[in-house]
Image: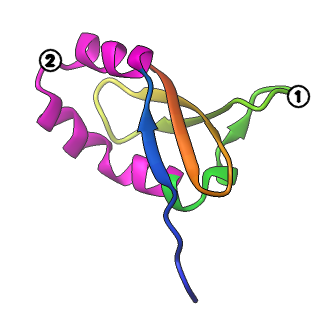
């Protein structure tokens, strides 16, 4: 089995929202590592938002829980937003 990771691209909105959730970027990256690796390797396992090309994935291991919104193609995953809930 050959596991393929797409390149993650952080939008300005995603980066800004990350800083609002956790000002320490390294700490947030570590907390989200499992989820972002899952998105990079299997983006289709997220939840598609209606008929759009936008998807969502939830991290239930972080406090607070977060939802990452993204779009993807064969080579890239575009992280377009993140919300704490």
From the image, tell me which residue sits under label 2: 23
- Quadrant in the picture for the N terminus: bottom right
Q: Residue 64: x, y in percent?
A: 32, 23
Q: Is residue 85 visible?
A: no
In the image: residue 18, left or right of residue 78? left
Image disc number at residue 51: 1
Find numbered disc 2 in the image and state the secondary structure of the residue it sits on: loop
Q: Is residue 52 above or below residue 3?
A: above
Find the residue positioned furthest to the bottom: 1
- Quadrant in the picture for the C terminus: top left
Q: Can residue 42 be found in the magenta stretch?
A: no
Residue at the (26%, 10%) spot, across then down = 20
Q: How many marks?
A: 2
Are discs 2 and 1 less than 8 Å apart at CB? no
In the image: residue 80, left or right of residue 15? right
In the image: residue 63, left or right of residue 57? left
Q: Residue 54: x, y in percent?
A: 70, 29
Q: Is residue 70 above or below residue 35?
A: above
Task: Tell me where residue 15 sits by quadrant.
Answer: top left
Q: Can residue 33 be found in the magenta stretch?
A: yes
In the image: residue 30, left or right of residue 9? left
Q: Where are the magenta residues, as a range?
A: 12-39
Query: Nearest the camera: 85 or 13?
Result: 13
Residue at the (39%, 17%) spot, across then down = 12
Q: Earlier in the sequence, mark 2 or mark 1?
A: 2
């Amino acid at each position: 089995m050959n596991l393929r990771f797409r390149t993650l691209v952080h939008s300005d909105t995603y980066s800004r929202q990350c800083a609002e959730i956790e000002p320490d970027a390294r700490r947030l990256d570590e907390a989200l590592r499992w989820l972002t690796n899952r998105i990079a390797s299997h983006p289709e396992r997220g939840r598609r938002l209606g008929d759009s090309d936008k998807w969502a994935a939830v991290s239930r291991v972080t406090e607070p829980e977060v939802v990452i919104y993204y779009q993807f193609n064969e080579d890239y995953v575009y992280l377009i937003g993140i919300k704490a809930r």
